[in-house]
Amino acid sequence: MKRLVVVGTGLIGGSFARAARQARLFDEILGVEPDAARAATAVAAGIVDRIVDTVPAAADAVLLAVPSDLIDGWVVRLADHAGIVFDAGSVKGAVLDRVRATLGRIPPRFVPCHPIAGSEQSGPAAASAELFAGHEAILTATAETAAAAVDAVAGWWRAVGARVTFLDPDEHDRILALTSHLPHLVAFAYLQQVTPAHLEHAAGGFRDFSRIAASDPAMWAPIFTLNGAAVLGALDGLQAELDRLRALIERDDRAGLGRLIEDSRTRRRAFVPPGDRSAAGSIPVITIDGPSGSGKGTVASLLARRLGWHLLDSGALYRIVAAVARERGVPLDDAQALAALARGLEIVFADERVFVDGADLTRTIRTEESSQGASQVAVLQPVRDAILDLQRAQCRPPGLVADGRDMGTVVFPDAPLKVFLDASAEVRAERRYNQLKNNGLSVSLAALLANIRERDERDRRRAVAPLRPAEDSVLIDSTELSIDEVLGRVLEAARVRGLVART
């Protein structure tokens, strides 16, 4: 019989027990829980099969889901236990130091872990089998940790839905001080200023900022002291930023405040919640980048149709911004105004037509003027930030084909297949000429060639997301290839990567 013992049946321990039972990892799950009420709840809810006073010798795995300052005592007590011991604490370095100070070594069957998942709720009643799904579980094994133990624990975390990563213990503590410990510390401090009278006027901003201040003090007080050096370092960095903000406000420097806020907004928008990372990671993406006239748009459209996937024409988004900006008199070099404009547009792609705020702009955005305007606005970081969320939101089942200039390098850097299409400037100018002529537009081939060369130079030299292939791109020169030949090469690359079944 394979047996798991969970020491601490609260949110983390209880959730792991539920998930492990659901995944049928163990035949029996026991709990060690000194709190009588929690123990009764854990048994009644089916989280554990029964409560025991101590860890029995016949246990294959022991999860230490106790406050961080109690972990080292349990590791010492179980140093010679035959089972694999792993924890879920938020501090690694100090715990390992304390174990080493007591034992003179780290037990080889102890695997330090930290699942980056949780809630402001606590206790077995809050336990959920889905708590770890899509979230990171960091393993901070030492040189003394047995490889077989690491492999076993990593397998258990994966089985309950977590993404397993590995970090050095001290690096883990420095990172978590900034991304987890400091936010909680600030939330606790902020709430000291809030009285019941203030709550009558609180709304969404208060709710979102203060949520984590409802966390368990028995868990967080030890974290702050055990990881004290890293937490104080993060606090010093925050104080420096607060001093900078104070100085900007005292100088009435609205431009400086605007730049700081915009920079912070950009950093926040780069964050993808763990659940969304998991969902997006399960949806295949094929990116097709390249200069104007390389055939990427046509190939992407044909590929999406062939596979039955969604299509993202990212260039259309920039052409839309440029076209609407011209129509509304917004200068194409006013980054903030263009970003505000982009965020306020209602854009709908339907049946190969493009509707913006209810108006059909399909033909308007295909003009050479809109194309040139797109190249101008695409170099502006605030505009790119405004469009990034819209681009990534197009990643929906069963898959996405995305064409543009930075799909593989910026928007979908983890795409399993990245293609970079190129062709000579002369051939691309001729293709563009024929495309515009077929749309009933009067153009000059010589002017198109000059524009393409100018745009190539601008796109490749721009500081923001320059036109270049990703390091792992499949490079295809389409100068002397037909569209069908290019499509065939892309499909073969997709088959090699297991994205498309061989026929």
Image: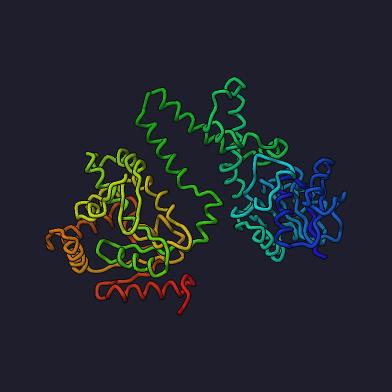
Judging from the image, the colouring scheme is: rainbow
Quarter of the image for the C terminus: give it: bottom left
The residue located at (43%, 26%) in the rendering is 247
**Residue 104: x, y in percent?**
77, 53
Give the left or right position of residue 231, taking residue 31 as reference: left
| Residue at the farthest bottom position | 503
Give the vertical position of 293 relative to 391 (above or below): below
**Residue 197: x, y in percent?**
59, 20
Quarter of the image for the N terminus: give it: bottom right
Choose between 248 and 40: the one closer to the eye: 40
The residue located at (52%, 36%) in the rendering is 237
**Residue 302: x, y in percent?**
34, 68
Choose between 455 and 445: the one closer to the eye: 445
The residue located at (75%, 47%) in the rendering is 71
Give the vertical position of 15 relative to 219 (above or below): below
| Residue at the farthest top position | 197
**Residue 68: x, y in percent?**
72, 44
Choose between 86 and 208: the one closer to the eye: 208
Give the total of numbered labels: 0
Choose between 251 and 274: the one closer to the eye: 274
The residue located at (28%, 62%) in the rendering is 291
